[in-house]
Amino acid sequence: MSEQEPSVFSRIVAREIPADIVFENERVIAFRDIAPKAPIHLLVVPKTERYRDVAELAAGDPGLLAELVETASTLAREHSDGDFRLVFNSGAGAGQTVFHVHAHLLSGGLEEGTLGKL
Ligand code: AMP
């Protein structure tokens, strides 16, 4: 039996690797993406790595998904003008590289027609 390595985001939660953390409570953490794709690009992440993607999270803990969205909305107001785009890459074919569910919170001067360019 092989034990799975903690995800990079679990290692951020555990303070094993550094991150620019902007919010944290018992169940959720948010920090700046290391390779930003928008003026404001935060990752909003459940602390548990039990759910690989947003569909698993919605099925397993819809309340936690709602908490992610609420946190994102609050952070968009705090860090920008309150308007935001929330992206959950789900599966390698959609660009997911970290299989610990996370929302990309993008904000600040996003233009129409840029949705597929993330
Ligand atoms: P995804 O491709 O949707 O799985 O998103 C993973 C995101 O995590 C990418 O946008 C990366 O830039 C970001 N990322 C990876 N490692 C770190 C890190 N140590 N600190 C902050 N963001 C990271």
Image: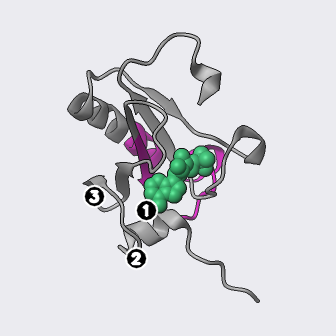
Viewer can see residue 62: no
Q: Which residue is the extreme one toward the left?
A: 78
Of all residues, the one furthest to the top in this rendering is 112
Residue range of the region highlighted in magenta in the rendering:
42-69
Q: Please tell me the numbered disc located at residue 81.
A: none
Q: From mark 3 to mark 2, how far is it between C-alphas?
A: 18 Å
Label 2 element class: loop
Q: Secondary structure at mark 3?
A: loop
Q: Quadrant of residue 81?
A: top left
In which quadrant of the rendered image does the N terminus lie?
bottom right
Q: Indicate the secondary structure of the residue bearing disc 1.
A: loop
Residue 16 bears which disc, if any?
2
Residue under numbered circle 1:
47
**Number of numbered callouts drawn:** 3
Going from N to C along the chain, the mark reached first, 3 or 2, is 2
- Which of the pair 23/113 is nearer the observer? 113
What amino acid type is highlighted by mark number 2? Glu
Question: What is the CA distance from the residue labelled 3 to the residue labelled 1?
Answer: 9 Å
- The structure residue drawn at horizontal position 35% and vertical position 20%, both measured from the top left corner, is 83
Mark 3 — residue?
25
- Label 2 to label 1, Cα distance in Å? 14 Å
In the visual, does 111 lie left or right of 79? right
From the top left corner, tell me how far across and down residue 64 is, in percent: 44, 49
What amino acid is at disc 3? Asn
In the image, taking residue 1 as reference, residue 72 lies left or right, namely: left
